[in-house]
Every structure is written in structure tokens, then in C-alpha cells.
């Protein structure tokens, strides 16, 4: 299945850092998401985009994971020539991951 079948996402940015939250639709799916959506998987999944460290935070109280991806936005909003300078599409891209 794809991650989008059991979760939704929110994205944000700060300079050259992209932040993606993955939130389970149902609390019962959260453990599966924690098991399948790891830092290692994200490093491989976004290997063409993310050049820095990825940190995962677990927010059990709301069944969510928060990923902070450094050096991920081509220098940041004021420096990047990318169409999606803020990285808003990265959350949608992550939801396409097979789990």
C-alpha cells in the first residue's frame, strides 16, 4: 500500500531545511507508520534532493512523525532556482512511498 492510504502530511521550511510531518488517519495505523517510515528509508527515497542529515521525531500523542531534512531545498527560498522553493510538494511525494 502507499503511505497516503493511511496518513496525510504537512510541510514547512526554514532556510535550507524541509520539515515534513506524517500524521496517521487512525491511531491504530501509527505503529505501522513508525515501523515503515524510517530515516534510512527517507534518505534513500529523497537521495536526489536531501544532501544533509535527516532527523525523525515521534509525536505519539497525535500519532505523527516529524522529519527535519537538512540541506534539502537547494539553498533555501532566497537562493534556490527550483520551482518549489519551499518544498511543499515533498509531503505529497512522501505519501507516494510504498510501505
Image: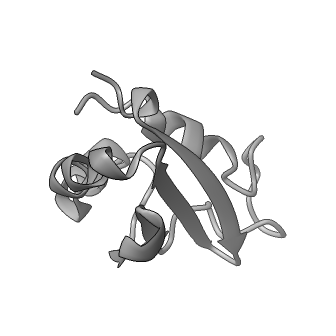
Vertical side of 11 occupied by 55: above or below: below
Q: Is residue 14 left or right of residue 54?
A: right
Of the 4 image quadrants, the one containing the C terminus is top left
Of the 4 image quadrants, the one containing the N terminus is top left
User: Would residue 53 be seen by someone viewing this image from the given angle?
Assistant: no
x and y percent of residue 86 in the render? Answer: 74, 57
Q: Is residue 73 left or right of residue 79?
A: left
Residue reaching furthest to the right: 78
x and y percent of residue 59 in the render? Answer: 41, 75
x and y percent of residue 77 in the render? Answer: 79, 65
Q: Residue at x 47, y 54 (%)?
A: 22
User: Would residue 68 be seen by someone viewing this image from the given angle?
Assistant: yes
69 or 2: nearer the viewer: 2
Q: Residue at x 23, y 58 (%)?
A: 34
75 or 27: nearer the viewer: 27
75 or 87: nearer the viewer: 87
x and y percent of residue 48 in the render? Answer: 39, 46
Amino acid at each position: 500500500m502507499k503511505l497516503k492510504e493511511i496518513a496525510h502530511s504537512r510541510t514547512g521550511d526554514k532556510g535550507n531545511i524541509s520539515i515534513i510531518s506524517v500524521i496517521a488517519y487512525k491511531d491504530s495505523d501509527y505503529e505501522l507508520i513508525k515501523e515503515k517510515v524510517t530515516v534510512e528509508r527517507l534518505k534513500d527515497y529523497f537521495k536526489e534532493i536531501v544532501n544533509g542529515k535527516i532527523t525523525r521525531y515521534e509525536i505519539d500523542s497525535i500519532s505523527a512523525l516529524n522529519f527535519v531534512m537538512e540541506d534539502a531545498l537547494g539553498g533555501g527560498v532566497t537562493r534556490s532556482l527550483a520551482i518549489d522553493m519551499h518544498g511543499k510538494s515533498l509531503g505529497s511525494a512522501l505519501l507516494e512511498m510504498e510501505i
